[in-house]
Image (cartoon, helix red, strand yellow):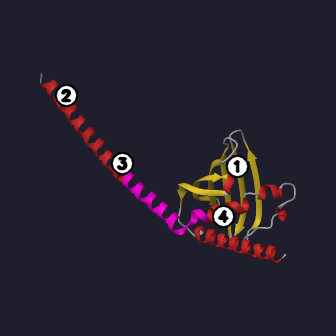
Amino acid sequence: MGERKKTRAKDLSEATVTDKKAERLKKQHEVNLKNAQVIIGHAMDTVRQTRIDKSLIEILKTVRHWPSLIDGKGQDAVEPAFNATEIGAEETTLDDHTITRVSFSYSGKRYGLVYRTQKSEPGERTTGTITLHEDGEKVIGIEVLEIHSHDIISYSDLNAFKNGEWMENVALMEKEIEAHRAETSQTQDAV
């Protein structure tokens, strides 16, 4: 009978240790979850405050046609609206989505922009994701909604984000695109 009591005491002791470990893991998980929520909230605030989502969309609108311009003609067929060099582009259409990949150098960095759209019913809307890589590292990914009849692409959610120099470069690219549009518009108005 003494052996049974020792076995029960040992079982109770092991169960108590297991319960304590489970409680500690639960608390650690709650802390990690709260930290993740703070980090995600900060990233979303940064995107909104810097308007980096809008800059990225403007860049997409500029580069999304590069694959058709380059096709068979080489990078010289593209007249970029910003100081992009070493341009490459391709578009792949699969059963349920289209992937547009554009790469270029800007301000000493190599950028890759990937626009993946989900095929939708013919008509109004397409959902997609825009991902930007700087020197091979993913720095931002956003989900977008495209409304074709109004030529609008709007930001809907953030799925990846890393602070860095790329943010300043993206803002500069957008400014160059805007200046190019204004210059093109003035030239067309003068004619």
Front label number (3 vs 2):
3
Magenta-colored stretch includes residue 46: yes
Distance CA(mark 3)–CA(mark 2):
33 Å
The crowd level at tag 4 (other Cα within 10 Å; few <14, some 14-19, many 20+) is: some
Q: Main secondary structure of the magenta part?
A: helix
- Could you tell me which residue is drawn at 26 percent across and 39 percent down? 19
User: Which amino acid is tagged 3?
Assistant: His
Picture quarter containing residue 70? bottom right
**Mark 4 and 1 residues: CB-CB less than 8 Å, in contact?**
no
As drawn, 13 above or below 143: above
Q: Which element is circle 3 on?
A: helix
| Residue 8 placement (x, y as % from top left) | 18, 28
Q: Which residue is mark 2?
A: 7
Q: Which residue is mark 4?
A: 58
Picture quarter containing residue 74? bottom right
The crowd level at tag 3 (other Cα within 10 Å; few <14, some 14-19, many 20+) is: few
Q: Is residue 127 visible?
A: yes
Q: Which element is circle 2 on?
A: helix
Q: Which residue is mark 3?
A: 29
